[in-house]
Image (tube, rainbow, N blue to C red):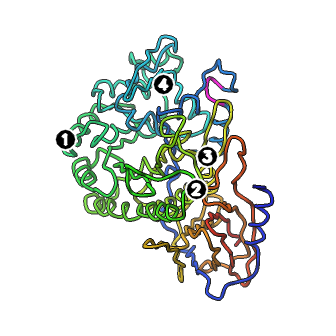
Amino acid sequence: MNTIKHGLAVLGLIAAPAFAANPVSIHIDAGKPGPVINKYVYGQFAEHLGTGVYEGMWVGPKSNIPNTRGWRNDVVGALKELHVPLVRWPGGCFADVYHWRDGIGPQDKRPSNVYGNHVEEINAVGTHEFFDLIEMMGADAYVNGNVGTGSVQEMSDWVEYMTSDGGSPLARLRAQNGREKPFKVAYFGVGNELWGCGGNMKPDYYANLYSNYEHFLRAPETSRPKMIASGGSGFDTTWTQVLSKELKGRTTGITVHQYTVPTGNWDVKGKDLGFKEGEWISTLANALKMDQLVKDHVAVLDKNDPEKKIGLMVDEWGTWYDEAGARSALFQQNSLRDALVAALNFHIFHEHAERVTLTTIAQMVNVLQAMILTDKEKMVLTPTYYAFQMYAPFQDARSLPLAIKDNTRYALGAVNIPGVSASAARAKDGKVYLALVNTDPNKAVDVAVDVDGTKVHGAAGKVLTSAAMDAHNTFQDPQVIKPAAFSVRAAGGRLSIKVPAKAIMVVALEE
């Protein structure tokens, strides 16, 4: 596909003045701002799986691939441009088999381990290397500790090693390993998926364990991480119920994990590419279930934590497809469909900004719904990368109430979902941003936009779309799909926008 021609075609389509007789109407109330959309909602996740860390990001200082202290320059540069606010590490399920002392000291003296299905961990990336990465990116750290195969002492020592600013033996060991000043740990998670890969525990048992672990996780008051409890999965609110009662005052958040599977069947999940329209709509419909999931968990939190001291942390989310000859564990291609899934989730998180204060998509590079794919020296940006890039103004923006009237419906067979999804916020630069998603892969939609108490003169931003539902970038053709710039002028203080089929738009309104 010729990207330039494609972009111009979309630009002309959007800027057209024609206005449908019955457009979708969007009204933004800029005079009644809602809660701030925490920048950590746009967090990322890097786990030691497949080539997610090794090769994908870390190649070592002796590699012929350009790097800085072992980290790929191209990948780090792309992530830095994405304004990644937070990175979760080292897992995931890997967190509960990871022993941090294996990843410190001279690299040639670090042990190699074999985990799970004969996955070798060379421990080249440990605590110091991880913090080097996030400091280069300008991100904050969300570190997950080992409950499953670890101990209270091991986790306590790790927190002290990272955060102590005194002359303790662990602070001196950190200095001996090249770091005098403490690392900044924004969040610390006590285990991961304790109901499953983290230890097959019951929530009451974990609540007692968490209290024990958290009690001994000592750090200087000025640099103590915010503690996160590992919660349940999907619509089961049992873990949220128990933990929000038992851990009040001891945790800043409870996690929940929810993946989007096209078929809803974990045994036969669906294809990453070459899918039919039936899997397009089922994927988006399953992504939209995140809204009810969040509502269910928030209802429990509202009952047990009316002071709203505990956040809901969706620290694993994204698409998950069948592996089809994948070259590494959990590697999947990333198409326009994935970008729409990301955008629909963003809108849901914005809607629940008061409680949803942190999320991390799974994952950053080469694993599941990744921002970036690599193959040796080659790198390609995915449609999901561009979705995160387009939504960057929503980080720490003030959410704005938005009403949609006369919305279209997109239906296929028994599945029926809203045609248009939207979200609005006033960003830190003072501008009002509007994000739009047209879920229909076949039809453009006319949208009329007005802002209460303000005359809108125009809008400018970007659109991401393509002719094919599974449009994706490859190492041979890395610019098949990317955002196109556009602008539109208002008439009488009202915007008329024609949103292309299967598209994401983010625009800044000119007031």
Furthest residue toward top = 109
Cα gap from disc 2 to disc 1, whole angstroms = 39 Å
Cα gap from disc 2 to disc 3, whole angstroms = 17 Å
Kindly report which numbered mark, 2 or 4, lies closer to the viewer in this rendering. Answer: 2
Mark 2 secondary-structure assignment: helix
Residue designated by label 4 = 126
Circle nearer the N terminus (2, 1): 1
Image coordinates for residue 156, horizontal then vertical, percent: 33, 27
Quick one: quadrant of the C terminus? bottom right
Circle nearer the N terminus (2, 4): 4
Three-letter amino acid code at disc 4?
A: Gly
Residue designated by label 1 = 205
Q: Residue at x 19, y 41 (%)?
A: 205
Q: Residues within 10 Å of mark 1 (few under 14, many from 20)?
A: few
Magenta region: 68-72
Image coordinates for residue 193, horizontal then vertical, percent: 32, 42
On the rendered structure, is 382 left or right of 271?
Answer: right
Badge number at residue 263: none
Badge number at residue 83: 3
